């Protein structure tokens, strides 16, 4: 009896209580519920811009690859890359004397056949020749005109004549080189304005229209935005990629952008004057949908939400959150519905 009484008294001592609590914790039953430290912020409404972002590569708004003339030849002159030229100006010379002589001969043939047609017409009117003479003379005249047009084109090609104002951005030939007919030689681009080519998934195509505001940022210089406009949107979907081609015209007055550069193009789909906007890091993508955690009376509560649009590090929420909610912006993955939290 005395031993039993002593045991009962010792069980009520503070030291025994600590031992008992420690034994309980070792069995996986905490003596007190844990409180998790999180970072929370009050949800507020802000202006929001809904941008679509896509990979893009640049080309001149006018862009042409000039090819060697019909009979090829030897390069006697070529201007250096970076040369600015006006429409009609020569960028190279490939046996220019030969092609100029052929053009002059073609012009002379046109004049000769034109005179023969005039004389044949007069003789038919006088009755000294039949109508077939006019037909034959007219055929010879038209053939001469066709040969003159061909010679004119060959002469322009032998001079690499610029079809528009622009810059020689690249070349694949050198002086004294012999080139084959139709060989690509020079690329000419208009660089005061460039065109960005993008591919838009067909699921996003209904969100865009010509005239929308755009931005372009280089991968190596993402801090600088070049403003532009969505100028063209294809009406047909590519059967293989299920995308629609779009073209953006971008200003380039200082010439810092170059054809062939790549970057990211953004298109402004819609502007909201007031919307519930939260950091994208606060989103929880779970099996049952997208959620966010809020603090309610010191307890974490899970909310199913609907994301209307995302832009950079922000997300616009259309359902599930309202102004004044205290959102867990950091530490949401460490808690579950009902967890006690402090912030």
Image (tube, helix red, strand yellow):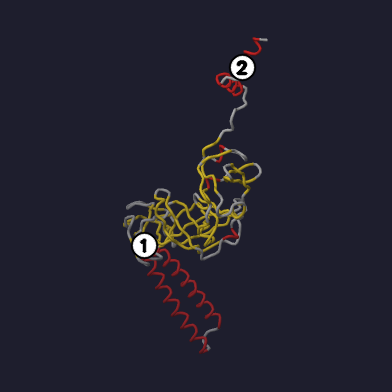
Classify the position of the N terminus by image quarter: top right
Which residue is the extreme one toward the bottom?
126
Q: Looking at the image, which is closer to me, 265 or 60? A: 265
Q: Is residue 158 visible?
A: no
Q: What's the residue at 49%, 51% (across, down)?
A: 312
Q: Looking at the image, which is closer to me, 16 or 6? A: 6
Q: Is residue 238 left or right of residue 159?
A: right
Return the x and y of residue 189 as percentages of the image width and height: 40, 60
Q: What's the residue at 54%, 44% (across, down)?
A: 328
Task: Identify the secondary structure beneath mark 2.
Answer: helix
Residue at label 2? 9
Q: What's the residue at 62%, 39% (across, down)?
A: 338
User: Crowding near pointer 1: few (<14 within 10 Å), some, many (20+)?
Assistant: few
Q: Looking at the image, which is closer to me, 280 or 76? A: 280
Q: Nearer the viewer, mark 2 or mark 1?
A: 2
Q: Looking at the image, which is closer to me, 250 or 187? A: 250
User: Crowding near pointer 2: few (<14 within 10 Å), some, many (20+)?
Assistant: few
Q: Picture quarter containing residue 76?
A: bottom left
Q: Number of marks in the image?
A: 2
Residue at label 1? 253
């Amino acid at each position: 009896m005395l031993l039993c009484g002593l045991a009962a008294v010792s069980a009520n001592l503070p030291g025994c209580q600590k031992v008992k609590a420690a034994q309980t914790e070792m069995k996986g039953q905490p003596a007190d519920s844990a409180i998790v430290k999180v970072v929370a912020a009050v949800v507020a409404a802000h202006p929001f811009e809904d941008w679509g972002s896509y990979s893009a590569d640049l080309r001149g708004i006018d862009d042409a690859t000039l090819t060697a003339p019909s009979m090829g030849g030897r390069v006697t002159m070529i201007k250096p890359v970076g040369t600015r030229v006006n429409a009609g100006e020569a960028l190279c010379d490939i046996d220019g004397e030969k092609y100029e002589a052929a053009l002059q001969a073609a012009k002379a043939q046109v004049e000769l056949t034109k005179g023969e047609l005039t004389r044949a017409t007069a003789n038919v009117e006088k009755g000294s020749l039949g109508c077939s003479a006019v037909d034959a003379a007219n055929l010879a005249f038209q053939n001469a005109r066709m040969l003159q047009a061909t010679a004119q084109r060959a002469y322009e090609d032998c001079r690499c004549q610029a079809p528009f104002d622009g810059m020689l951005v690249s070349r694949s030939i050198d002086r004294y080189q012999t080139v084959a007919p139709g060989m690509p030689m020079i690329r000419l681009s208009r660089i005061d304005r460039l065109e960005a080519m993008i591919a838009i998934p067909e699921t996003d195509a209904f969100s865009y229209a010509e005239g929308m505001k755009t931005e372009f940022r280089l991968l190596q210089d993402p801090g600088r935005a070049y403003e532009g406009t969505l100028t063209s949107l294809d009406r047909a979907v590519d059967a293989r990629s299920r995308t629609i081609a779009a073209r953006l015209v971008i200003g380039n007055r200082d010439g810092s952008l170059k054809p062939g550069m790549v970057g990211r193009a953004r298109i402004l789909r819609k502007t909201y004057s007031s919307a519930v906007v939260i950091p994208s890091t606060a989103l929880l993508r779970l099996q049952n949908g997208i959620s966010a955690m809020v603090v309610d009376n010191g307890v974490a509560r899970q909310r199913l939400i609907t994301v209307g649009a995302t832009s950079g590090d922000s997300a616009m929420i259309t359902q599930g959150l309202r102004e004044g909610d205290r959102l867990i912006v950091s530490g949401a993955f460490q808690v579950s519905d009902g967890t006690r939290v402090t912030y």
